[in-house]
Image: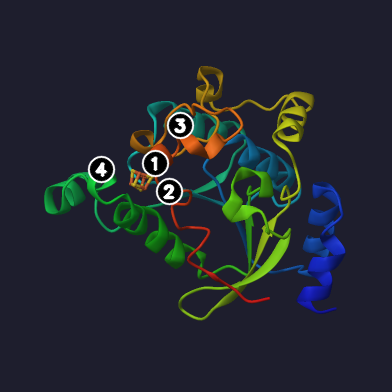
């Protein structure tokens, strides 16, 4: 079956069923999950760890996360015995700030490029399947997201990008979290709805627009979900 046919056949399946079908169709292929430990990522991680316990969990270690995020990441990694991979930029925060200034203030696009996009481009090279916690509802830039898409990395490599929760609502995310007793980042209880690097994450004024709290509404994407070219 072609990738396009497989992608179409998975589109209306539940995350559990889509994952089983995907792993069966691509048995033996190297897979990874990009994970910021937000609620959606925890659900995908929960589904994956029961089937592929040693799946690499790629955390973009920008050096700018909340202390609570680091504490939560480390606790979950320990409790779930994760194969955690901290993906780091070429420069430390101190090196970057002394050479280029406070980029998250003056040029957040460059900061995201250096601390997230370029490191992830490299980190994805060994894999054939890239799992994400993306949902269509999160942003207008994600509204056409398919559960399985073929992407081409800038270096020319093709891989599948799988977003098992693409069609889920925020309510479904919390229903799963509650029903399955998953813990979650403590910032949610403070009113945060979309949680990334601390300097670029605020409690959103509009609770119906979770990502309006990111980059003070000046941009919607850091670039990690826009750098690869969709190949189908
Ligand atoms: S989210 Fe902010 S701090 Fe993090 S890499 Fe992007 S600009 Fe830099």
Q: State which tag comes first along the sequence, 2 or 3.
A: 3
Q: Which residue shows up at 82% across the image and 59% down it?
A: 11
Classed neighbour count for the residue bearing mark 3: other residues with Cα under 10 Å, few (<14), some (14–19), many (≥20): many
Q: State which tag comes first along the sequence, 3 or 1.
A: 3
Numbered disc 4: secondary structure: helix
| Above or below, comparing residue 66 to residue 20 in the picture | above
| Above or below, comparing residue 205 to residue 218 in the picture | above
Residue 81 seen in this snapshot: yes
Q: Which disc is residue 215 wearing?
A: 1
Numbered disc 3: secondary structure: helix
Residue under circle 2?
219
Q: State which tag comes first along the sequence, 4 or 3.
A: 3
Q: Which residue shows up at 85% across the image and 78% down it?
A: 1
Residue under circle 4?
105
117 or 145: nearer the viewer: 145
| Above or below, comparing residue 107 to residue 183 in the picture | below
Q: Are marks 2 and 1 in contact (CB under 8 Å)?
A: yes
The percent position of residue 76, horizontal first and vertical second, equals 56, 33
Q: Give the alpha-carbon distance from disc 2 to disc 1, as whole Å.
A: 6 Å
Residue under circle 3?
69
């Amino acid at each position: 079956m072609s990738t396009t046919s497989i992608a179409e056949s998975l589109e209306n399946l539940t995350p559990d069923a889509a994952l089983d079908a995907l792993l069966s169709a691509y048995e033996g292929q190297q897979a990874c999950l990009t994970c910021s430990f937000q609620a959606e990522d925890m659900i995908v991680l929960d589904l994956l760890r029961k089937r592929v316990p040693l799946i690499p969990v790629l955390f973009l270690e920008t050096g700018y996360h909340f202390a609570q995020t680091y504490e939560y990441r480390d606790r979950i990694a320990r409790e779930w015995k994760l194969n955690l991979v901290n993906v780091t930029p070429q420069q430390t925060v101190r090196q970057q700030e002394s050479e280029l200034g406070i980029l998250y203030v003056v040029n957040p696009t460059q900061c995201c490029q250096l601390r997230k996009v370029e490191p992830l481009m490299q980190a994805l090279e060994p894999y054939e399947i890239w799992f994400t916690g993306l949902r269509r509802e999160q942003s207008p830039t994600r509204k056409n997201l398919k559960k399985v898409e073929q992407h081409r990395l800038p270096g020319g490599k093709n891989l599948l990008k799988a977003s098992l929760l693409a069609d889920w609502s925020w309510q479904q995310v919390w229903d799963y979290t509650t029903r399955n007793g998953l813990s979650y980042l403590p910032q949610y209880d403070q009113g945060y709805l979309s949680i990334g690097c601390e300097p670029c994450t605020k409690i959103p004024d509009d609770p119906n627009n979770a990502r309006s709290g990111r980059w003070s509404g000046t941009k919607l994407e850091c670039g990690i979900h826009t750098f690869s070219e969709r190949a189908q």
